[in-house]
Amino acid sequence: MTTTQVNQSNAYNDESALNDYFQSLSKMNATPLWTAMDKIVPPYPKPRAAPTAWAYSVMRPALMHAASIVGAEEAERRVLMLVNEAIAAPYTTDTIYAGLQIVLPGETAPAHRHRAFALRFIIEGTGGFTAIEGERIDMRRGDVVLTPSWQWHDHGNEGSDPVIWLDGLDLPLWQHIPINFVDQYTEPRYPSEPAPDSAARIQWKIVAQALDEQRIPHAIYQYHLPDGSHLSKTISAQAERVEAGHTTTTSCKVLSYIYHVYSGQGFSMIKTPNEATAKRLDWTEKDTFAVPAWSEVSHTCTMDSGAVYLFALNDRPMIESLTFLNKP
Ligand code: GTQ
């Protein structure tokens, strides 16, 4: 045996020598890749998110409770973050954040701007508005209101009931790329004028019509800006109609989604690459649920008549621009 061979076999078998070696590495701010290879370069895609659901019947009282303990102005944004059951905030999925925001009559969520992109899907209340860079936009049930990066925005409510909406932001990305920060405006409200025709609002009736025109049991509509592009460079949105009694074809997408039930009821079967079996999430109107990336998913409408209408945030723009929309 040569000296080299002897040394090698010792190094492979001597556990305490290995431990000493690993300890010496940590003092050098180094660590072996070969003991962590599966985690660092996984053999299959491993989303951290798990399928998670938030029932509106549970979340609405919690939002009303929040409204009784903190003012919108004091909170800056009175939001209950929807936290994925397998990851800490701000992760609702690996790439998308969602929260539920409530503004009471007469309140103002003060003007600020940030690098992060935001969109809102209005769940309930009349008289709510978002002012975006001087455009005052009424918020109506089912509408999507956009807040592009670095535009001043404040929210208010001039109606007589609470206004509640789903916030969708690209915040998880900025945990990794530190370009997001907030700038506070000097006054609670940024000066604004009513803008009934603003391109920053996409009305539900337009989306519903586009879904209904597709005379198929499972219709999908991708939101886009007037120039045909996605709603932002990072996250966008889609809507779906599933006819009464219909189950969609099971499909597996690279994208992750946060679904919100506009109307109707049913359930989704969601199998992530991390689990052997699918998880069933039952849902009804105004509920929200997270679908991790790379999941096999089907949606079933359990109603006897009519159809379920679903809204979903997705991370399509980012994945598409990385050219990873399709599986290799
Ligand atoms: O309305 O600007 O849910 O800045 C999280 C961060 C909402 C907002 C959120 C925000 C906002």
Image: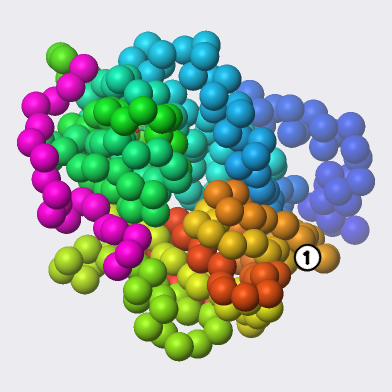
Give the image quarter of residue 151: top left
Q: Amino acid at mark 1?
A: Ala
Q: Looking at the image, is 323 positioned above or below residue 200? A: below
Residue at image position (11%, 40%) is: 194
Stretch in magenta? 188-206
- The kind of secondary structure element at disc 1 is loop
Residue at image position (17%, 66%) is: 226
Q: Position of residue 222 (x, y in %)?
A: 37, 70
Give the image quarter of residue 153: top left
Q: Position of residue 147 (x, y in %)?
A: 26, 43
Q: Is residue 123 magenta?
A: no
Q: Can you name the residue that lies furthest to the bottom here?
A: 215
Helix, strand or loop for the magenta stretch, by majority: loop
Q: Nearer the viewer, residue 66 or 297?
A: 66
Q: Can you name the residue that lies furthest to the front here?
A: 160
Q: Position of residue 36 (x, y in %)?
A: 71, 48
Q: Quadrant of ligand 1?
A: top left
Q: Quadrant of the N terminus?
A: bottom right
Q: Position of residue 18 (x, y in %)?
A: 82, 37
Q: Is residue 191 magenta?
A: yes
Whether residue 139 is visible, yes or no, is yes
Taking 134 as reference, is 148 left or right?
right
Whether residue 296 is visible, yes or no, is no
Q: Looking at the image, is 307 positioned above or below residue 114? A: below
Q: Which residue is mark 1?
A: 278
Taking 103 as reference, is 230 left or right?
left
In the image, the residue with mark 1 has its CB under 8 Å from the nearest atom of ligand 1: no
Q: How is the image coloured?
A: rainbow
Residue at image position (11%, 45%) is: 195
Residue at image position (30%, 43%) is: 139
